Image (cartoon, rainbow, N blue to C red):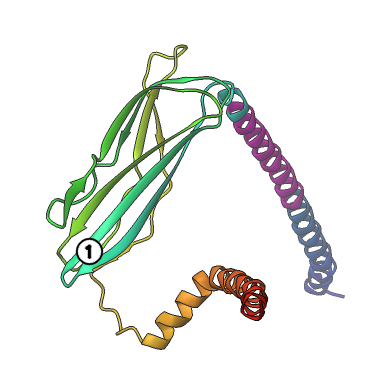
C-alpha cells in the first residue's frame, strides 16, 4: 500500500467525523435558539401582564376622583325641500366618586358653510357636577347644503381640586350625517303600517274602552224606552 492510498483512507475516515461534528453543532445551535425564544416569549408575556396590571391600577386610582362620560346624539328632520333640521343633545355623566368643578362643554366643530345655529349654543358651562349625577345640553342647527358630514366628539373640560391642570374628556362620536340625502317617495301603505306599529296598541285600548261603554249604555237606553 502506497502513501497515497493511506492518505485517501484517512480522508474517508475523517469525513463522517467532520459531518457528525457539524450536525451536532447544528443541533446545539437550534436548541439554544429555541431556549432563547422561549425565554424571550416568557419575558414578553410577563412584561405584558405587568403593563396591563399597571394600567388597571392607574384606572382604579383615577376613579377615586371624578370620571366623566358623555354621550352625543343627533336627530335629523326634513322640514321642507332643501332644509334639514339637526337636533343635537349631549348627556354628561359623572361616574366617579368625587365632584368635578368648572365643567365646560364645547361642540364647535359644525362647519359654518353648512350649518346655521337656530336654537341654543354649541358651548355651555356649569359650576359643578357631583358624583353620580348627570347634565344635559341641547341645541338645533339647520343645513341647506347637501353633503356627508363627519362630526367630531364634543370636548368636556373640568377641574379637580387635587390637580392644577385642567382635565379633558370626550363624548362618544356620531355616525356620518347624510345631509339632504335623496329619499325615495314614501308610500301611503308604508306610512299607515308604521303609524299602526307605533300607535296600534293605544288605538286598540281606546277601541275596547269605547266598545265597553257602548255595551253598557245600550241596555240602559232600551230599558228607558220600555218604561
Q: Quadrant of the N terminus?
A: bottom right
What residue sits 66% from the left and 72% below the top? 216
Given residues 5 and 201, the one toward you in this image is: 201
What residue sits 77% from the left and 47% below the top? 35
Relative side of 111 to 90, left or right: left
Q: Quadrant of residue 122?
A: top left
The residue carrying pointer 1 sits among few (fewer than 14), some (14 to 19) or many (20 or more) residues within 10 Å by Cα, namely: many
Q: Residue furthest right?
A: 1
Highlighted magenta segment, given as a residue range: 33-58
Given residues 202 and 189, the one toward you in this image is: 202
What residue sits 49% from the left and 35% below the top? 93
Q: Is residue 66 above or below residue 136?
A: above
Q: Which residue is mark 1?
A: 84
Q: Quadrant of the C terminus?
A: bottom right
Q: Position of residue 70 (x, y in %)?
A: 44, 40
Query: Would residue 53 be counted in the magenta stretch?
Result: yes
Q: Position of residue 7 (x, y in %)?
A: 79, 68
Given residues 31 and 93, the one toward you in this image is: 93
Amino acid at each position: 500500500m502506497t502513501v497515497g492510498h493511506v492518505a485517501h483512507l484517512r480522508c474517508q475516515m475523517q469525513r463522517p467525523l467532520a459531518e457528525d461534528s457539524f450536525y451536532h453543532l447544528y443541533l446545539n445551535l437550534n436548541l439554544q435558539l429555541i431556549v432563547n425564544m422561549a425565554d424571550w416569549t416568557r419575558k414578553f408575556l410577563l412584561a405584558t401582564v405587568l403593563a396591563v396590571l399597571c394600567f388597571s391600577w392607574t384606572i382604579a386610582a383615577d376613579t377615586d376622583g371624578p370620571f366623566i362620560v358623555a354621550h352625543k346624539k343627533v336627530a335629523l328632520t326634513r322640514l321642507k325641500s332643501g332644509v334639514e333640521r339637526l337636533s343635537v343633545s349631549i348627556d354628561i355623566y359623572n361616574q366617579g366618586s368625587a365632584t368635578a368643578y368648572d365643567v365646560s362643554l364645547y361642540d364647535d366643530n359644525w362647519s359654518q358653510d353648512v350649518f346655521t345655529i337656530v336654537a341654543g349654543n354649541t358651548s355651555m358651562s356649569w359650576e359643578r357636577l357631583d358624583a353620580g349625577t348627570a347634565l344635559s345640553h341641547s341645541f338645533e342647527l339647520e343645513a341647506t347644503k347637501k353633503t356627508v358630514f363627519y362630526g367630531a366628539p364634543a370636548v368636556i373640560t373640568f377641574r379637580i381640586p387635587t390637580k392644577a391642570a385642567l382635565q379633558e374628556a370626550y363624548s362618544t362620536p356620531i355616525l356620518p350625517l347624510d345631509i339632504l340625502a335623496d329619499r325615495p317617495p314614501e308610500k301611503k301603505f308604508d306610512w299607515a303600517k308604521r303609524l299602526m306599529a307605533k300607535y296600534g296598541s293605544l288605538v286598540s285600548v281606546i277601541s275596547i274602552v269605547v266598545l265597553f261603554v257602548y255595551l253598557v249604555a245600550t241596555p240602559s237606553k232600551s230599558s228607558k224606552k220600555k218604561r
